[in-house]
Amino acid sequence: MSNGHTFTIEVNPKIPRRLARLEELATNLWYSWDRPTRTLFARLHPGLWDAVGHNPKLFLRRIDEQRLVDAVDDQVFLATYNRVLSAYDTYHAEPMRPTGQETLREQDLVAYFCFEFGLHESFPIYSGGLGILAGDHCKAASDMRLPFVAVGLLYRQGYFTQTINSEGQQVATYYDADFDDLPVQPVRQDDGSELHVKVPLAGRQVAVKVWEATIGHVRLLLLDTDLEENTPEDRDITHQLYGGDRHTRIRQEIILGIGGPRALTAMGLKPTVWHINEGHAAFLILERIRMLRAGGLDFASALEAVAVNTVFTTHTPVPAGHDHFAQDMIETYFRDFLPELGLSREEFIALGRKDDAPDFNMTALAIRGSRHHNGVSRIHGEVSARICADLWPQIDPAENPMSYVTNGVHVPTFLALEWAELFDQFLGYEWRHRMSDVSYWAKIDQIPDHLFWSVHQSLKSQMLQLVRHRIAHQHLRNHGSQAHLDRMFRHADPANPNVLTIGFARRFATYKRATLLFENLDWLREILADGERPVLFIFAGKAHPADQPGQELIRQIYHIMHMPEFVGKVLLAEGYDLNMARRLVAGVDVWLNNPIYPLEASGTSGMKAGINGVLNLSVLDGWWGEGYDGKNGWAIKPAPENMDEYRRNKEDSQTLYELLQDQVIPLYYKRDKFGYSPEWVKMAKTSIATLLPRFNSGRMVGEYVSRFYLPAAKAGRRYAESGFANARTLAAWKERVRAAWGGVALRRVDTPKRRIRFGDEVRFEVAARLNGLDPADVVVEMLMTRANKYHIKDAHHYRFSFDRVDSETGEHRFVLDLAPSLCGRLDYRIRAYPAHALLTHPLEMGLMVWL
């Protein structure tokens, strides 16, 4: 018997005038880092707040109107509401504090392009570290009042929701978002109509709708192809984050890279700095060149004008991780674009050529189309310089233009409110404005140990409650027994959080080695057998649905979690998201990270843990290679890179077991009469004092401003002067240098001296065949260092001066009069490279000749 069709209607409450600004609070992602704002919504209906995934906009659509009416008469709620509004208004009205350093002009604008943005769990357009980093970058830009606009894609399906079944298998479920539920609104034109732009795609035009989200002071523009006027295939382009095949990926990258600049132009926004965060958005280089070509500039000059104010950040530590597309695919999508660029097919493909590989490489395009390039930690900068070395073929990787800016995390987002309140009490409110003042943070010692420990234990209790809730839901859904659940939770007791708790939570990629802890189960059993010093390990994280090896790691941990000897000592929680991440990084005692060196580009979860007084136990890779000082955590010195996988895992796991057994566990349980370890507390304080001022996103974005954004904006203006005269000049000069460089050579003219006294001056003389170049076009240089210790980075540099033209040979003579500042046996080498005042980096052409 049929009961008929069920229809649905949603009845939204009318928000009382007294609470009208709740809607404003719900649509500004300021709430993503202001916990009092989120708490304000939760107070109205805690159950609904959890049910809607902490989404304030959706919450206001679904709450019973009576609760809002009652809140108007609730003086406690109104007082909280007024405090939140006061903080919100103060943040948005407060002028930027003078720092004493030069910053961007008001007429400047940084356009920051990224494939994903991780701002809050209620806004699921991110998958992992890249997105969280981009979100933190935007938040810090807002805090600093930078002229800044971000550009990304608005996905109907963000990253998946994870559950784990009774076999330990990850189950990925995707949900289509209703954009009415998200903190976005369409960008509208002056006539009130929605802004749409057109993007060429394989011989057709795709319509793209532009949405806008607000992140404090910062605008985030998001592009969407799900429009009726598009074909079903094109509507699907922005449907899923990292979904589909290679065609989907290149289409998404075209929409972002070409649609993004067109959206900015349509809105009247004129960026003076363009920041490509990972290679996905590199096609914007082509669109910007196309616009300059339409204005009459030749391709080479347009490339220089575009590159000089473009910043490229790479996050990928392995060559295979850089996006690349087959040449025929590139030709399919850009065939109609080539005439507008004025390039042949071969010239176009050359823009993306790397290592003589046949595919079009997006990192190669990004580097050729930018003059400011960086990795995201010191180690990753060195790795990236080697990976990209062929783009500067005659330059040693240690000297090529690849630099680094170590990542940082947004402290207001990831520092637990309880810590912030404790800092207010003992450090004063000014700590918020002195986050990068290393000496200031020594004041953390003023906090009494017992209060410090009490805050940590409170956060640990909150974390255990969340983990128990997630695991209980998972266990009972999989028809597990209550008795077994009780056994699993024997060490995860929120009422008695006195068990050493170690957390591992991140993307389950194989190089992160989530199962390294289980390399030697016998040794681990021994470590965990001490009933007087129990240890609890908590694991969480997602593997990409296409990553079967990553999913196998989850199955292995699930299996070990249910082995009798590990029940209650190893927990695996499903549904890892930003909410759980915030709890874990603030609540565990130790943060474990053991990637394969040097594959951790930076890593930021350990930073989030460290600023919350959680101690890092990590391989010396990524940021920890800079953060570890011997007193703020523990370091796993990695096995050599050339070691085979079996031996490397054995070596690194042995170090891990020894640290746990000999240092971590004994220190935690070295408790005094008050029930905690004073030495542990001292190390936790040191963690905050040394890591928070160095690894916050304010410091990170400040470095981008001083080292990249300011120089890029200035150079961009300089190149654009007088109809791009300087861009034309440099392009013509580079063409002349490249044509001549194959015939440039050096020879020694003077007779080398073998021994001199300290203080004596020696003349060195070199004859250079310049093949038509002028002496001003080159630098002739000596590099000197101590014998047998030749490192280019450590060498002393001395420039030769042009002396004369040899009338017989036509060679140009260069001389150097030098009294060496070092004693002992010295090595020196002599070289020449192109030089021009308009170059951004002295070695950007990648050309060099050695004697």
Image (cartoon, rainbow, N blue to C red):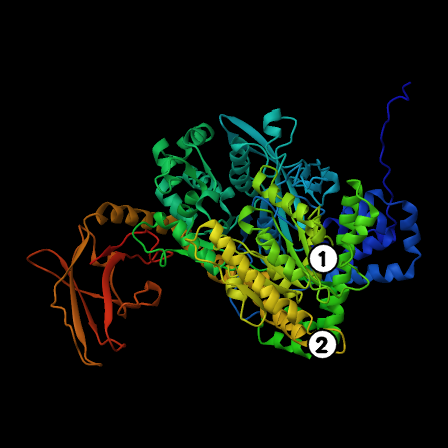
- Does 593 sit left or right of 477 as displayed? left
- The numbered disc on residue 107 is none
Residue highlighted by disc 2: 449
Query: Can I make out residue 344 in this image?
Result: no
In this orientation, which residue lies closer to the viewer: 417 or 311? 417
Look at the picture and state if 437 lies above or below 599: below
Quarter of image, res 822: bottom left
- Quadrant where the C terminus sits is bottom left
- Does 388 sit left or right of 37 as displayed? left
Q: Position of residue 499 (x, y in %)?
A: 73, 64
First reached walking from the N terminus: tag 2 or tag 1:
2
In this orientation, which residue lies closer to the viewer: 368 or 676? 676
Quarter of image, res 422: bottom right
Quarter of image, res 224: top right
Look at the picture and state if 194 lies above or below 727: above
> Disc 1 on helix, strand or loop?
helix
> Disc 2 on helix, strand or loop?
helix
- Quadrant where the N terminus sits is top right
Q: Position of residue 58 (x, y in %)?
A: 78, 44
In this orientation, which residue lies closer to the viewer: 762 or 731? 762
- The numbered disc on residue 583 is 1
Q: Residue at x 37, y 38 (%)?
A: 357
Q: What amino acid does circle 1 point to?
A: Arg
Look at the picture and state if 64 lies above or below 337: below
Q: Residue at x 59, y 26 (%)?
A: 233
Few, some or many C-alpha atoms within 10 Å of disc 1 (few <14, some 14-19, many ≥20)?
many
Q: How many marks?
A: 2
Q: What amino acid does circle 2 point to?
A: Asp
